[in-house]
Amino acid sequence: MQRPARGSADELILAPPVAAAPRARGLAWHRVNRVQERLLGYALIAPVALLIVVLIAYPFLNAIWLSLTEKMVGYPAHFVGFKNYAALWESARFRIVAWNSVVYTVGSIGAKVVIGLAMAAALQKAVRGNQLLRGFLLLPWVIPTVVIALTWRWLLDLYRGLVNVGLHDLGVISAGIHWLGNPDLAMLSVIMANVWRGFPFFGVSFLAAMQTVPQDLYDAASVDGASAWQQFWRISLPSIKGVVAIVTLLSTIWTLNDFNIVYIMTRGGPGAATHIFATYSYELGIQSQRWGMAMAASMYSLPVIAFLIVFVVRYLHPEEPSS
């Protein structure tokens, strides 16, 4: 029998597929590796996911459920839908609480942004003693909130408060001012305490962002004759707008849910002059034992927070117009 010529079509047809099996095994091994890597990734994030579910998701969903029930201590929960929300909105006291929450949050955040920007602008220049001053200004942020609230309550005391004593000694007032007992001054007092506690966080965050701005921009602006205010307004502020938005969002969430400062200083009084969502929820849930109503009161801040989060995300990542 004559052997086919080398390189002929018969030889190509009769040649065994020696490379097909190793290639198939390689593809199968690659798929196994991908599955193993995926399973490893799931295994690594499983503890964190479980922790989030246990500590955040379950309590949050349970709070929503309780807000839809007529739950009182010692009695089973009865589903009532949005009855609690409607009852709260029809309550004149709750409308005062909602307005107080807006005033407390807007007043505190606005003052902290202004003071924080001024602090960052003042400390931006490298001068002698800056590091020591930065550490000193950070003290209010690291002191426990309870200590701050008690300190301000003592400072504003009608008879022994340092503020009234100082104003009296300077001849500004003839009698002590009832800072925490006057409905018109009580809100201002708790806002001052909140601002004093929170402005270092704003200042340090803004300062860290400003220090990432290239110095060449300031040098060029100085050569062009720009003043310090123009450099801040045209260079510093636009460069840190993302940090300003995020810090403002975080502080807004914290301030809306603030409890310690208001409750320790005024207990929400006088009357309901300083009651906010957190203190009013405490009054309903702990003092009146009406858990369902308390959860509904606290949930009223949720739409505000959700709106702010969406607004900040869209502000930081605007959608590009489609071509």
Image: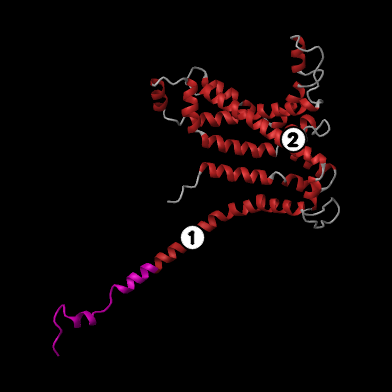
Pinpoint residue 78: horizontal percent, then vertical percent.
82, 57
Query: Which residues are drawn in magenta?
Result: 1-27
Q: Amino acid at mark 1?
A: Arg
- Of the residues under marks 1 and 2, which one precedes in the sequence? 1
Q: Amino acid at mark 2?
A: Asn
Camera-nearest label, 1 or 2: 2
Give the crowd class for mark 2: few <14, some 14-19, many >=20 residues within 10 Å. many
Which type of secondary structure does the marked residue at label 2 adopt? helix
Q: Which quadrant of the view contains residue 254? A: top right
Pinpoint residue 54: horizontal percent, then vertical percent.
66, 53
Which color scheme did the rendering employ for the protein?
A: secondary structure
Pinpoint residue 205: horizontal percent, then vertical percent.
55, 32
Q: Which residue is mark 2?
A: 100
Q: Residue at the front extreme?
A: 323
Does 23 lie within the magenta span? Answer: yes
Determine which of the numbered discs, if any, sits on residue 38 in the image.
1
Residue 308 to residue 148: above or below: below
Q: Residue at the bottom extreme?
A: 1
Q: How far apart are labels 1 and 2 at the CA level?
A: 50 Å
